[in-house]
Image: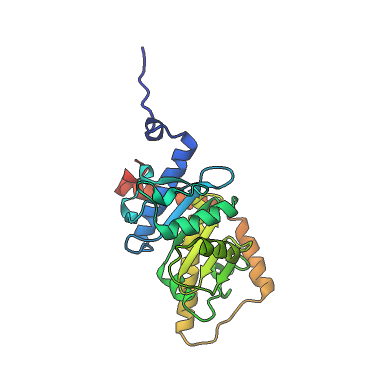
Amino acid sequence: MTIAVRESAGAQRGIDAAEWELRVDLAAAFRLAYEFDWHESVGNHFSAAVSADGKKFLLNPRWQHFSSVKASDLLLLDADDTETMNRPNPPDASAWCIHGAIHAAKPLARVLLHCHPPYATALASLKDPSMKPIDQNTARFFGLVGVDLDFGGIADEQEEGARLVKAFGNHPILLMGNHGVTVTAPSVAEAFEHLYFFERAAKTLMLAYASSQPLNILSDEVAQKTADGWRDYNGMAFAHFEQLKKMLDKKDKSYRE
């Protein structure tokens, strides 16, 4: 008896299994950002490197709402392709500027999530937007966050992409003054966990500021110990993301298409 084996959605489109899995995870991240109210109209961008050098990467299409993004919608771009913006269905100019530059310069930053969550953006709007370690969630980011205080308007020039690469330095997260936040990580699950906890930490810090009481800031020693302790819980990111995808599946599995 012959049993018919149905091709995966990726195989039907001529996409290898690894890239398709990455597409599904990135599409899930968009849907989850919508669920958590981190989206902003049809702007903001998430990307993920496909090639080892980071120059070939997936990016959301120009002006498509996060709530509708599917795995098959994601653009496959090449940072070295100087004709990208002249081709049919070009990406958003600011996304091409920022994500193309960072992926090309930082191949270990496999996934980039950039958005303007309310509390992270409020923190970014302060004269001193640094993430003060006042509890274990804020201390999670001790030593991990670069701060850019040179906002100059919407980024759509090559020089701005290069400047942001420099602003990142060796940090996996960049708090973009007067703008928002960009997180990077080796996987979608880890990047999403960065974004999830960063927004929660920013909320805690902004609420503490709102009390008008002095902050009880942890010492550098305790903050570093706490941040180091979080490394032992890295597996949480994958467990959390898988359970969030199951939550999505119960509501709408179309992100997997």
Please identify the residue farthest to the right as the structure is shown: 221
Q: Position of residue 220 (x, y in %)?
A: 67, 74
Q: Quadrant of residue 221?
A: bottom right
Q: Quadrant of residue 33?
A: bottom left
Dividing the picture into quadrants, the one containing residue 10 is top left
Residue 251, given in percent of the width and then of the height, sits at 30, 49
Q: Quadrant of the C terminus?
A: top left
Q: Position of residue 35 (x, y in %)?
A: 35, 58
What residue is rendered at 50% in x and 62% in y? 182
The one of 243 and 85 positioned closer to us in this rendering: 85
| Left-right relation of 71 to 49 | left
Q: Quadrant of the N terminus?
A: top left
Q: Is residue 32 above or below residue 216?
A: above
Residue at horizontal 60 percent and vertical 51 percent from the top? 108
- How many marks overall? 0
| Image position of 230 with respect to 247: above or below | below
Query: Measured along the vertical axis of the image, is residue 128 above or below residue 179?
Result: below
Query: Looking at the picture, how far across and down is residue 93, in whole percent?
Result: 41, 58
Does any portion of residue 59 appear in the rendered image? Answer: no
Please tell me whether residue 161 is drawn above or below residue 126 in the rendered image.
above
The answer to whether residue 246 is visible is: yes
For this rendering, which residue is in front, 247 or 21?
21
Q: Nearer the viewer, residue 172 or 63?
A: 63
Name the colouring of the figure. rainbow
